Amino acid sequence: MTHAPHSSSAAPILRVRGVRKHFTLHLRDGRDLPVLHGVDLDAAPGECVALVGASGKGKSTLIKCLYGNYGVDAGSILLRTDGTARGEIDIAQATPQQVIGLRQRAIAYVSQFLRAVPRVPAIDVVAERLLQANPVTADLGQAGAWEAAQDAAREEVAALFERLNLPRALWQLPPATFSGGEQQRVNIARGFILPSDLLLLDEPTASLDAANRRVVMQLIQEAKARGTAVIGIFHDEEVRDAVATRCVTLPSAANELETTR
Ligand SMILES: Nc1ncnc2c1ncn2[C@@H]1O[C@H](COP(=O)(O)OP(=O)(O)OP(=O)(O)O)[C@@H](O)[C@H]1O
Ligand SMILES: [Mg+2]
């Protein structure tokens, strides 16, 4: 299934060219497992590109490369950071400090599994993202400045938790013991609480019931309407059909050989 691009006139904010990646399997005598075989991919503001392909083809691996979690063997991952080609940064070559900077505002990622700092309440797991992106500018010594910023951030998170039907009784608890769907909603809240230029979604609705799936579909549509470029993996075809503006299949090793012959 291929849809027409949503905003074909907009210049891509992300340009991925020739990305290759393999893993070395140390537990199997150091054998190489080639996973990404020359990926080219563009994403423009306001569009949602769905990555499709069989299990194990490298969809999650590509998302992690785009987020700067994994280095690549070859290729470039160019992200426009100030609306011009001059402000382009190659995530494949970025320093860890640059990657951290990009993650504060420009790139958001909803992974399939929540990895949160232990003992931090769910509401603060999400509020922290707001506070990091908007550092308190008032003198921290000024009475109550930090607390006021924290209260404002928590209020914003509470509104999103309400929307995601996360039971109020859980907000002050650390998410470690939450159910799969509850953890996923905390994860989704972290990904959506701030507008970002690029939003990476790895099966964001996998453990959700129908009502919450609908909320997430709405959140994705709102992000697109704000001009976010979304790249996602959606095994649920109903979700994919509702949100994706086009689908991209990752090239396999055989395809690559065909094109280079
Ligand atoms: N950290 C890693 N170390 C070694 N091999 C890995 C690693 N991560 C992924 N792989 C392997 O790379 C291949 C691609 O994995 P990936 O998780 O990207 O697939 P996927 O397309 O997302 O699959 P699914 O649809 O099942 O989620 C798989 O064969 C997997 O076993
Ligand atoms: Mg995957």
Image (cartoon, rainbow, N blue to C red):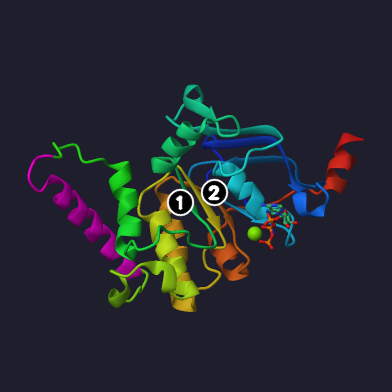
Amino acid on which disc 2 is placed: His
Q: Crowding near pointer 2: few (<14 within 10 Å), some, many (20+)?
A: some
Tell me the quarter of the image containing the C terminus.
top right
On screen, residue 142 versus residue 250, left or right, reads left
Position of 118 relative to 6 (above/below): below
The residue beneath circle 1 is: 224
Q: Which mark is residue 6?
A: 2
Q: Position of residue 126 (x, y in %)?
A: 34, 57
Instruction: Please say if 189 is above or below 71.
Output: below
In this rendered view, identify the residue nearer to me: 121 or 61. 121
- For image coordinates 47% across by 32% down, the residue present is 98
User: Dividing the picture into quarters, in which one does residue 94 lie?
Assistant: top right
Extreme residue in the top direction: 86
Ligand 1: quadrant of the figure: bottom right
User: Which span is picked out in magenta?
Assistant: 141-163
Q: Quadrant of residue 118?
A: bottom left
- At which x and y percent is residue 219? 42, 60
Q: In this orientation, which residue lies closer to the viewer: 179 or 200?
A: 179
Coordinates of residue 131 in the picture (x, y in percent): 28, 47
Q: On the rendered structure, is 173 left or right of 227?
A: left
Left or right: where 116 falls relative to 206: left
Determine whether the residue tagged by mark 1 lies in a helix, strand or loop. Answer: helix
